[in-house]
Amino acid sequence: MSERIRMAAMVRNRPGAAGRGWPLLLAVLIVVALAIGWVGYIASDDSAYYDGAARWLARPPFAGSDHWTTRFPVVLAFAASLMLFGHRLLAFDVVAVLWYLALVALVVAQVRAIAGARAGWIAGILTATLPVVVASGSTVGCDIPEALFLLAGAGLLGDRWQRPGHALAAGLCFGLAMLCRETAGLALVGLGPLFLIGRPIPRRLLIWAGVGIALVLGGEALFQWTMTGDPSRRYVLAFNHDDQMRRAANMEGNLLVHPAVDPLLVLLVNNDFALLFWLGIAAVAGGFWRRHDRSAMARLAVPAALAIAMAVLVGALTTKLVLNPRYFTVTAVVMAMIVAIWLDGIGPRWRWGLLTVAVGSNLLMLSVQNGHPRWPAEALVRAAVAYPRATIVADAETLHRAALPLRFQRSANARAAGAGLRLIPAADADRRLPLVARYPSPPTTAGAVLRAIGIEARVPSGVAGRLFRPNPDMELRGHP
């Protein structure tokens, strides 16, 4: 039996075994997924990362001033993009897409090494179209960098060579993951049981990995001590940046029933994961590991341990972290790897059928997401460009969200108070003022398709609002 498994592995890994169509299919689906799920600048954490990157370029080194600007791998990569492309939104887009592509490439390479070329390409397709990954693939954030470094470390630690140098490099990756976001430490708790068991990763390699983690975190602490006098500064900022976390925040986009089962519901009933975890249940029930030798499957031990630890601990710490699907990115990507290995091992008809369902559900969930979550700010930018000689008055929050795009295009005619043309949601507009311009909410991708084929009127009103007008229509009123 083991000899047949080894022969099958040789066939799967021979050059051209997966066919040339797989990389082309992956490339096409990457373009399609990004086109459907593109969000871009959202004036949230990405603006904080911009501030840190800009200050590194202006007066380096910069120790960070808050929770976000101490995430140095994210900030420094962003600074490199700003240096190459200038202070404009293109720099945001490029660095976000490069992190996304790097994660997809890493997943393909790791699964290929475990289960063969075809399984690697399937894993890349599932990852590249997964809504929680795509949403981060166009916005500067820490979710994909954290997942990338965690999985890179897992791959190095669990590779077939089992060398101290690789384990040390794995620890460096784990340390970088923690610098991207401290939640990576929750995933690393999964290394504890592996150390206690002593297999499939020898304890000496886990110790070497620990040395790598200590080098990165110790180096960062030394940097903070040199710059600020406080070696623990990043952790003080991280653990005190939001002391008002409430369970009400968990309700945003989640179906919640009871704290004991809510984390599971987030994984199973959520747009960000589509059908992934349902297919994962089928993969585990179907014994996805049976067609592969034990040494190959052992390489999944580290990523699986990290994924399980992250899911369990995030679920247990809902009062500190909230049940945001982004915190489950590592868990979702590892599940995509498992599903890919399972699909690779079943018959071609079932493989293509289930892969089509998985990718189709991913793209469908992407198509109903709001691609313009800061539409009032976008409308303000458009109004400022269209009427450069007029003063555009908007509320303080909208002005804050639009500040960077306005600065990049050198528009200085927007104000939070005073006389001028007022930008306001259409539902709240003063009809006595003349209408100058209207900025209707862009539909979701699915809404745009339904509108184009002429069936918008047939969509139930409860669904139509989310599909065709996910944001308030904005109006510009006043006397020019």
Image (cartoon, grey):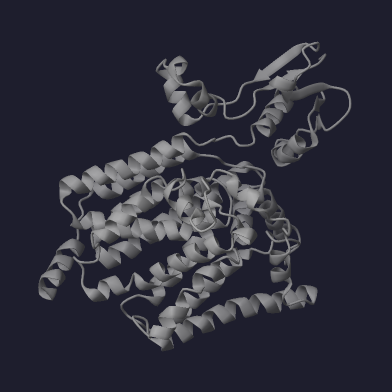
Based on the displayed image, in which of its 4 quarters is residue 418 positioned?
top right
Q: Quadrant of the N terminus?
A: bottom left
Residue that appears at 35% across and 45% down: 27
Q: Is residue 90 visible?
A: yes
x and y percentages locating residue 122 in the rendered image: 29, 52
Above or below, 53 against 437 in this view is below
Residue 268 appears left or right of 123: right
Q: Is residue 285 above or below residue 426?
A: below
Q: In the rendered view of the protein, which quadrant contains the C terminus?
A: top right
Q: Is residue 283 left or right of residue 214?
A: left
Relative to residue 160, is residue 252 depicted above or below?
Answer: above
| Percent position of residue 107, x then y | 37, 59
Residue at 44% over, 46% down: 269
> Residue 354, image x and y in percent?
26, 45
- Return the residue found at the far bottom: 204
Residue 404, x across and y down, in percent:
71, 42
Answer with the quarter of the image where residue 390 lies. Answer: top right
**Visible residue check, residue 35:** no
Q: Residue at x 45, y 39 (%)?
A: 366
Q: In the current view of this chain or complex, which residue is farthest to the right?
A: 418
Q: Is residue 3 left or right of residue 457?
A: left
Q: Is residue 7 above or below residue 123?
A: below
